[in-house]
Image: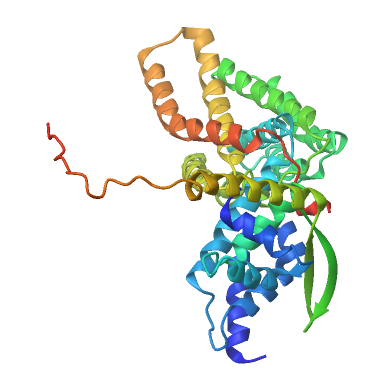
C-alpha cells in the first residue's frame, strides 16, 4: 500500500472514532474499504464531505444505540448513574476522621462499588460490595459527634442512596463503557488529596463537579442520560444538605439563596437534557444492522 | 422518501452491490446529482436494513478487507415502486397541462406599504 493510502487509512480510522465501539467492531473495515475506493489516488486526507459524513453518522449511530433500550430501562440506567455520581461526590464525608482505618475502608469500598457495581450488572454483587461501606456508615450513625443531626442525616441519606443503588442494579441493559469514569472522578480527586486537609479535598470536589458539568453538557450531543444523571446527583446533594437544617430550624434566607443558586446551575442542563432524553428514548426502536 | 434513499434503493434494482458500487451507481442514475459520502451511505444502509428494505447478501474479503454486498428486499422494491409512482403522478400534474404563463400580459407594480 502506498504511503498516502496508509495515511488516509489512519485518518479514516481516527474519524471512525465518532462511532460507538460495537458499531466499529462490526463495520469499520468495510467502511474504510469503501472510503479508500471512493477517494482518488494520491490523496492522503479524506474529503471534507466524507469527514463530515463520518462525524455526523457516528453521532447518529450513538443516538440510535441510546434509543435501543426502552424509556423505562433508560430511566433506570440514568438513576443508577445519578446515584453513583452523588455518592462519589459525597465520599469525602466518609473519609472523616482522616487517617482513620475505618474511614479508609469505607472510602476504598465505596470507591470500588462506584467503579465496578454499575457495570457488574448484578444486584447481589452490588449489595455485597456496598456492605462494608454501609456497615461503616451505620456504625458511625451510633457514634456521638458535634452537629449531630446534620451528620446523622447525611449518613442516613448516604445509606438510603446505597440501598437504592443496589436495588436499581441488575437486569439489562448494560450502561455504555464510556460512562465508567463519570462517577470515579470525585473519589479519585479525593484520593489524590486524601492525605491533605479536609478543605483542600472539598475544594477539589467542587472543581470536579464543575468539570463534570462541562463534560455532561458536551455529552448532550449524543447522549442526554449523563446530563440527566448529573442533575439527579445535584438534586440529591441539595436535598441532603437542606433537609436536616429544614427539620431543625426551618427555611432561612441564606438557605433559600443557596437553593436558588443550585437550581440556576441545574436548570440550563436539566431542560435540554429532559427534552433530548425524551427524544432519544421515544419509541425504543430496534438497533439497526446489529440484529441482522 | 429522501432523494438519496431513493437512489440507494434504485441502485440495487439490477442486483446486489457493495458500498462503493452503490455510491457509483447512485451517482450515475441521478446524473451526478446524488454523490453519497461514505458516512451518509452507511447511515442510509443501516436505516434501510432496520426498515427491512435492504439486506446483507454476501461477504467476501478483498485485499485483506471485508466487503459486504447488499440487495433489495421485496418490501424495499415495493417501497421504491410506490415512491416512483408518487413522483410520476406528481410529475403528470405539471407535464400533462399546458402552462398559462403571464408572458405578454401587462405587469403591475406590487404595492408597497
Residue, far bottom: A2
Depth check: give the residue in front, A150 or A253. Answer: A253
Going 79% across and 53% down the picture, which residue do you hit? A290
Residue, far right: A124
Residue A119 at x, y = what percent? Answer: 77, 45
**Residue B9 relative to residue A203: left or right:** right
Going 54% across and 15% down the picture, which residue do you hit? A243
- Say above or below: A10 vs A187: below
Q: Is residue A231 visible?
A: yes
Q: Tell me the colour scheme of the image.
A: rainbow
Depth check: give the residue in front, A249 or B2. Answer: B2
Going 57% across and 65% down the picture, which residue do you hit? B30
Q: Is residue A95 visible?
A: no
Residue A146 at x, y = what percent? Answer: 55, 20
Depth check: give the residue in front, B97 or A31. Answer: B97
Total marks placed:
0
Residue A143 at x, y = what percent? Answer: 68, 21
Residue A36 at x, y = what percent? Answer: 64, 79
Q: Quadrant of residue B19?
A: bottom right
**Residue A256 relative to residue B11: left or right:** left
**Residue A258 relative to residue A178: left or right:** left
Q: Quadrant of residue A28?
A: bottom right
Q: Quadrant of residue A235?
A: top right
Depth check: give the residue in front, A99 or A111. Answer: A111
Going 58% across and 15% down the picture, which residue do you hit? A149
- Quarter of the rendering occupied by the C terminus of chain A: bottom right
- Say above or below: B27 vs A180: below
- Quarter of the rendering occupied by the N terminus of chain A: bottom right
Amino acid at each position: 500500500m502506498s504511503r498516502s493510502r496508509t495515511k488516509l487509512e489512519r485518518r479514516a480510522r481516527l474519524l471512525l472514532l465518532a462511532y460507538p465501539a460495537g458499531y466499529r467492531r462490526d463495520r469499520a473495515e468495510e467502511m474504510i474499504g469503501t472510503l479508500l475506493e471512493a477517494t482518488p489516488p494520491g490523496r492522503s486526507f479524506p474529503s471534507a464531505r466524507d469527514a463530515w459524513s463520518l462525524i455526523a453518522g457516528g453521532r447518529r449511530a450513538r443516538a440510535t444505540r441510546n434509543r435501543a433500550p426502552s424509556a423505562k430501562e433508560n430511566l433506570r440506567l440514568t438513576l443508577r448513574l445519578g446515584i453513583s455520581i452523588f455518592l462519589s461526590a459525597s465520599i469525602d464525608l466518609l473519609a472523616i476522621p482522616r487517617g482513620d482505618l475505618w474511614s479508609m475502608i469505607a472510602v476504598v469500598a465505596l470507591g470500588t462499588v462506584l467503579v465496578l457495581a454499575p457495570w457488574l450488572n448484578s444486584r447481589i454483587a452490588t449489595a455485597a460490595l456496598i456492605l462494608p461501606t454501609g456497615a461503616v456508615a451505620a456504625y458511625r450513625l451510633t457514634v456521638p459527634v458535634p452537629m449531630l443531626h446534620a451528620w446523622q442525616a447525611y449518613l442516613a441519606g448516604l445509606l438510603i442512596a446505597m440501598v437504592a443503588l443496589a436495588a436499581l442494579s441488575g437486569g439489562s441493559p448494560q450502561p455504555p463503557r464510556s460512562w465508567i469514569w463519570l462517577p470515579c472522578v470525585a473519589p479519585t480527586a479525593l484520593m489524590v488529596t486524601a492525605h491533605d486537609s479536609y478543605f483542600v479535598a472539598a475544594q477539589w470536589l467542587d472543581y470536579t463537579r464543575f468539570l463534570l458539568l462541562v463534560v455532561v453538557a458536551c455529552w448532550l450531543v449524543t447522549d442526554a442520560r449523563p446530563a440527566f444523571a448529573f442533575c439527579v446527583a445535584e438534586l440529591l446533594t441539595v436535598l441532603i444538605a437542606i433537609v436536616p437544617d429544614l427539620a431543625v430550624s426551618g427555611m432561612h434566607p441564606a438557605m433559600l439563596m443557596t437553593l436558588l443558586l443550585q437550581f440556576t446551575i441545574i436548570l440550563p442542563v436539566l431542560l435540554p437534557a429532559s427534552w433530548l432524553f425524551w427524544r432519544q428514548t421515544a419509541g425504543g426502536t430496534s438497533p439497526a444492522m446489529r440484529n441482522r | 422518501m429522501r432523494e438519496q434513499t431513493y437512489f440507494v434503493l434504485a441502485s440495487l434494482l439490477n442486483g446486489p452491490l457493495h458500498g462503493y458500487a452503490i455510491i457509483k451507481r447512485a451517482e450515475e442514475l441521478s446524473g451526478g446529482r446524488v454523490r453519497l459520502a461514505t458516512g451518509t451511505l452507511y447511515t442510509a444502509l443501516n436505516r434501510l436494513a432496520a426498515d427491512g428494505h435492504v439486506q446483507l447478501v454476501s461477504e467476501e474479503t478483498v485485499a485483506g478487507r471485508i466487503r459486504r454486498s447488499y440487495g433489495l428486499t421485496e418490501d424495499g422494491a415495493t417501497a421504491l415502486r410506490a415512491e416512483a409512482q408518487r413522483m410520476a403522478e406528481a410529475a403528470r400534474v405539471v407535464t400533462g397541462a399546458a402552462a398559462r404563463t403571464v408572458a405578454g400580459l401587462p405587469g403591475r407594480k406590487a404595492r408597497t406599504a
